[in-house]
Image (cartoon, rainbow, N blue to C red):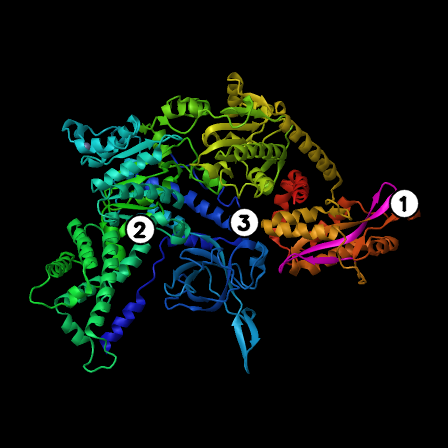
Amino acid sequence: MQGLWEVKEKKEKKERIIKGRDLVDVVFSWSVRDVLNSKLYKGKVDKIPNTFQSSKEYFKSFVNPIIEETHAALLSSMETLRRAPAFKVWEIKPAKDFKPPKNLYYEVTLQTVSDNTTKGDGKLLEFNDLVAVTDNKPYRIDDLRCSNEPYLLALVCGVNEDNPHLITILASKPIVFEEGHMETRKKGKGVKKSLSLFCVYLTNMMTNIRIWIALHPDPEGGNLKLISKVLQSNNEVGGESCVSCQENSENIMPNHIEKRLRSFKLNTSQEEAILRCLEAKNCRHSNNIKLIWGPPGTGKTKTTSVLLLNLFKMRCRTLTCAPTNIAVLEVASRVVKLVSESLRLGGYGLGDIVLFGNKERMKIDDREDLFDVFLDYRVDELYDCFLALTGWRANVQRMISLLTDPKEVYRQSFIENDKRRPSFKKFVEKRFSKLRTDLRSQFSTLCLHLPTASLSFQVAEKMNATNDLLRAMKVSDVVRVSRKEDARKQDCVEMLGSICESIELPDFIGKFGLQRLCLENAYLMFCTASSSAKLHMSCPIQLLVIDEAAQLKECESAIPLQLPGLRHAVLIGDEKQLPAMIQSKIASEADLGRSLFERLVLLGHKKQLLNMQYRMHPSISIFPNREFYGMKILDAPSVRVRSYEKQFLPGKMYGPYSFINVPYGREQFGQGFSSKNIVEVSLVDEILSKLYSVSRKSGRSISVGVISPYKAQVFAIQEKIGKKYDTSEKFTVSVRSVDGFQGGEEDIIIVSTVRSNGKGAIGFLSNQQRTNVALTRARFCLWILGNESTLTNNKSVWSRLVDDAKARHCFHDAYDDESLAQCIKRSATALDDLAKLQSNKLLSFENSIWKVLLTNEFLKSLETIIDSEINKRVMSVLEKISNGKFQQDSKSENLFRQEDIDDGLSLIWTVDIIKKQNHYLQVLKIWHVLPSSDVSCAEKCLEKHYKRYTKLKIERCRYICSQGNVVVPMRWPVKSCLKNDMISDVSRSFALLSVLDEAEVQSSKTSLMNLFKIQEFLKRWKMKNVWTIRRKALLQRS
Ligand SMILES: [Zn+2]
C-alpha cells in the first residue's frame, strides 16, 4: 500500500510546464492602461543589427521587438473587443496543480449552449489563446475595467481532446468567486445559482510563444550549426560553391539527374539554381545556405517544386516551410502533383510526403488534392487498419483461414444446430465478399499512406496482385475443397502470408504512434515555419527549404533553422517584394519584419537569380525591371511574340501599358483613416463595365484585377461594383489591396493610386516593395490611374514612373476618353454637393423629411465603433427616423429619445430647433451612440443642456406634427419668436456637453479610456468631418 501511495504522490507532483512562460508572464504583468498605451515600449526596442557577435546576441536582439509585437496584437484585439467571441463559463474550479502565487491553474467548463458566440467558424477556444476573464460580456474596453473583477487575463494551456468545452487556463491573478458572479435562477423547488463569468477571446499567442522558445534555445542540446552561419557576413557562407567539394570533384552531378532536370524544360537560370542547391546539399565540409532570388513571373514555384521532386528522388529528408498556410498549401500542392505523375504504382510513395498543421486554419477541407498527404487524415485512415480486431492483419488471417479450410471456419462460427445458421455456401459467399472488400480498401490505404520505409515496393506490388487474384476468384472456387487445389487459391494464400511477414509493424498502433511513424519516415515534409516547432523532438532532418523566404520574419525562421540534424538550408524569395506584416510600428521600425533572406542579401550573400520572366508583356516589365532589378530580368520569348499584345478596348489609352491621368480627383479619408478617391472609384467602375461588354459580345475570357494600396479605396470599389460580375464565368474581377495581391496575376490590372493633393504627399505609396508588387501583377495590360501633379511633386519612384510613361508615349489624360470624362464630371458634382453639406454639419438623407444634425460627440462615438455591421445599423436607424418614422406620443417631460441599435448599444437623440434663413425649423439632433448602461448618465447631461432653453423653445421642440404615421418637421417664422431664446449654436451646446462629460468622469463609469479616446480623437480632428461625407456617400449608393 505504501508503494502505491508514493507513486500517486509523485504523479501529482509532476509540474505542468508552460512553454514560453516568461513571455506569458510579461503579458500578464500589463495593466489595462499598459495594454492601451501604444507607446509602452517606445524607446525600449533597439533596432535589430545587421551582424552579430554571438548567437546569444543574435537571439537577444529579437526579444524586445517580439514583446512589443505581442503587445500590439493585444492592443489591436482590444479595439475590436465588441466583435470578440465570448464564451460563457459553466463551471470553474482550481486545477489539481493550482499553486499560488504563480501557478494559478483553473479547470473551466465552457457552456455548451449555442448562444455562445463561437470564433466565427464554430470553433471554441484553442491552445495558447489569450482570454480576458470577466463577469460581463464586454462591448468596449471600459467594460473590462468596470466589471467587479479587476482586469484579468488567462492563457488557455490545455484543451480536452474528447470534449473541447473542458479547458485548463493559467490566470494572471486569482479568480475570486463573489456573490456578484452568481446568477440566481429558480429551478424546480430549489434555487439554483449559476456562474456569470465569461472568457473573451483576445488573441492567439502560439506563434509568438514558439518564436520565444526558439529565441531561448536549450544551452546544451540545440542545433546552432546554421544559426552560427548567419551571424556575420562571411565569405565562406557567401553562397559560393564549397571549395573542398570542387577540389575533390565531389559535386559533379550524376548524369541521370541532369537528364531528369532537362525533362522539365527549365531555363538555364532555373536549372543552375537547382543544381547549385543539390550540390550544396551533398556537401559534407560545411553548412550551406543558398538563396534563390525569384522576381515576379520568373517561375519561382516551378523551380521550387522541381527542386523538391529531385530531393524526393534522392531520398533527402527535407522540410519545406513557408510563412503562411496559403503559401504552404500552394507549394505542397505543386509538389504532390509533380510526384504523383512520376509514381509507378497508384499512390504508392505518397506516404513519404507529409503535410501537417492546423486543419481549420489551413482550410484543408477545401483542398481535395492534398487529402492524401495531410497528416491528420492519414493517421485517421491508418488507425482503422491497425485496430487489433478489425485491422488489416486480422483480416488477412481470416482470409487465409477461409481459403485453406472454409469448412472449419464455418464450423467454428456457429454452434451446431443453430437455427439461424445459414447454409455453408451462403456463409462462405458472405464472408468472402466482405473480407475481399475490406482487404482491398485496407491494402490500398496501406500502400497510399505508409512510408515506403515500412512497406517496400515489392510488398505493395504483392498487395496489388493479391487484390487482382481475389477479385477474379469466384465463391465456387473457395467452396471447392477438392484434392486438386486450385493454383490461384494457393498463390493467394502464399502471397497473403508473405505480405504478413514482410511488414514489421505491430498489429495495433495508436494515433500518436502512427503520427510518429509517418513523420519520422517521411522524406518531404510541409508546414508553416511556426508549426515546424512540432518537429523539434523528431528524427534528424537533412535540408530545410523556405519558400517565400523574404516574407518570413527572421526570428520566425529561427524555429526551423534549429531543427535537429539540419545541415543546409535553401531560401527562396524576393526581397524586392513585400516583407512580413508587422502590427506594431515600434517593432516594425526596429526591423522585426525583415527576413533572414533580406539581411543576407544586405551582407552581400550570393543569390541565384532566376532571370527570365514569363508573365508580363515587355511594355509592362520594362519599368519595374529597370527600377527594381537593375535590368537583370529578360523577357521570355513567349511574352515577346505578337500574340501576347492584346487590345481589349479601342484606343491607345488601353494598350498594354498606360498611365491615365485623373486631374480632378479628390482624396478623402475613409475607413480607419485610410484614403480613398471617389473619382477614381467611378473611373474603375466605368472601365470595368466597358471590359465586361467586350467580354460578353466576343465571348472572350478576361480576368481583371483592381489594386489599390489603400484599404478604404479597395472597400469603396468593392462596394461600387457589388455583385455585378459574380455570375459571369468568363469575366472575373478581383479587387484587393497590394498586400492581398502578392503572388497573384491577372490578364488586366488596374491600379488606383488614390492620392491627389497639392502637396505631393503620397504616404503609403512611397513604399518601393509595395509599388513593385502592384506593378508586376499584369499579363497583358496594366493601366495606372493617378494624379500626375501629386505623383510628380516628390522624387519618388512614382514621379519616375510618370516621366517614363511620358517618354514612352504611354501617358494619357482621362479626359481623352469621352465616357471617362462624363464620369469625372458626374462624380465631381457629387463631391461639391457633399462639401456643401459638410460645411453645414447637416446630414440629409436622400428624400428624407427631416434634417439631421450630428453632434461632434456623436461622430466621436461612431469612431469608437469599429464593427461595420453596427455602423450600418446606426445609419439605418438614422435613415428611419429622418423619414419621420418614430414614436409620436412623447408626453414625457424631457425631450430625450432613445433608439436601441442592438442589445448593448443605444442611439440618443432629440428634436431640436435651428434657425434657417427666416424660419425656425425642427430638426433631429443626434447626440450619441453609447452602451445602454450609460444612457441614464447621458440623459442627465441632456437635461442640463435643455435647462438653458426658453419655455417656448422647449415647447417647439416637443411639438409633434404628423401626417398619417409619419412625423414631419414644423417650421415657424422668425418674427413670431422671442429674440433672445436662440441658443442653438451647435458648437456651444457640444462644448457644454463634453465639459459635463468630463466632470462625470470621477463619479460615473465614464473612465480614463474615454479620455484617452477623446484625446486621440482630437488629434485626428481635421479628418473627422470627412466621416460625415463618407456616410452620406454610402447611403446614397444603397
Ligand atoms: Zn563541400
* Residue, disc 2: 372
Disc 3 CB within 8 Å of nearest ligand 1 atom: no
Task: Label 2: state its secondary structure.
Answer: helix
Residue 709 as seen in the image, left or right of residue 223? right
Mark 1–mark 3 CB contact (< 8 Å):
no
Task: Name which residue type carries label 3.
Answer: Leu
Mark number displayed over residue 974: 1
Does the magenta segment cover residue 918?
yes
> Which numbered disc, 2 or 3, marks the residue that appears first in the sequence?
3
Highlighted magenta segment, given as a residue range? 895-921
Tell me the SS state at disc 3: helix
Whether residue 27 appears in this view of the structure is yes
Report how far apart the C-alphas of labels 1 and 3 lie in the structure: 50 Å
Mark nearer the viewer, 1 or 2: 2
Mark 1 or 3: the one toward you: 1
Q: Earlier in the sequence, mark 1 or mark 2?
A: 2
- Residue 36 badge: 3
- On screen, residue 417 above or below 966: below
Q: Is residue 353 magenta?
A: no
> Within 10 Å of the Cα at label 1, are there few (<14), some (14-19), or many (20+) other Cα atoms?
some
Residue 681 appears at what percent x and percent y?
60, 35
Look at the picture and state if 719 lies above or below 412. above
Residue 230 relative to residue 713: left or right: left
